[in-house]
Image (cartoon, helix red, strand yellow):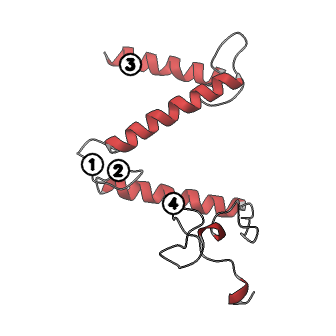
Amino acid sequence: MTPAALPPPRCRCPEVGVPCPACRTWQATHRRESAPQARVRAPRSLHAKAMQARYQRQRRATFLAEGRCTRCGVTVPPGQVRCDRCVRYQQRRSTQMATQRKAQGVCPRCGSAPEAGMVLCRRCIDRSRQYQRRREAAS
């Protein structure tokens, strides 16, 4: 492809239908749903997914060793892994996922098929029991 044939760069301008102050083009050409020339991303290969997962593990380990939030990188107090903002985000996201999974009739923790007559799947039930036993043994 020649440089002239490439689609315009993406822009994060909030208004549609006005010239973008950053790139001086019309915002409508930047939106995926309104830009037919926008490229569709091909599915990632298993190798690419594995490389991304490896990078994320290394990133989280580095942030943890430096005393930073493992999600966003903000400095956190000693003993904490995530900042308050990321903790609130994770709580909201977990609640949303559990609600969606309950509505779908699957295990609200992992999304697999629940045990007959139960809300949780066998694996999550076993994990809960192990956790309770450890807590009782510790106290």
Percent coordinates x, y for residue 127 in the rendering? 54, 23
* Amino acid type indicated by mark 2: Cys
Depth-wise, is mark 2 or mark 3 nearer the camera? Answer: 2
10 Å neighbourhood of mark 3: few (<14), some, or many (≥20)?
Answer: few
**Which of 111/24 is in front?**
24
**Image quarter hosting the N terminus:** bottom right
Q: Please identify the quarter of the rendering in which residue 40 is found.
A: bottom right
Amino acid at pointer 4: Pro
Residue 14, numbered circle: 4
Give the quarter of the figure containing the C terminus.
top left
Distance between the alpha carbons at the discs numbered 4 and 2: 29 Å
Where is residue 21? Give x, y as percent.
48, 74
- Which of discs 1 and 4 lies nearer the camera? The answer is 4
Which residue is under mark 2?
Answer: 69
Alpha carbon of mark 1 to alpha carbon of mark 2: how far? 6 Å
Q: With respect to residue 65, does 19 lie above or below? A: below
Dot 4 falls on a residue whose secondary structure is loop
| Image location (x, y in percent) of residue 20 | 52, 73
Label 1 crowding class (10 Å Cα cut-off): few <14, some 14-19, many 20+?
A: some
Callout 1: SS: loop
Residue 126's image quarter? top right
Q: Residue furthest front?
A: 18
Mark 1 to mark 4: distance in Å? 32 Å
Q: Give the mark nearest the N terminus, 1 or 2.
A: 2
- Callout 1 amino acid: Val
- Residue of label 1: 76
Query: What mark, if any, has residue 135 been given in the picture?
Result: 3
Residue at 73%, 85% in the rendered image: 5
Towards the viewer: 129 or 117? 117
Q: Which mark is residue 84?
A: none
Amino acid marked by disc 3: Arg
Local SS, label 2:
loop
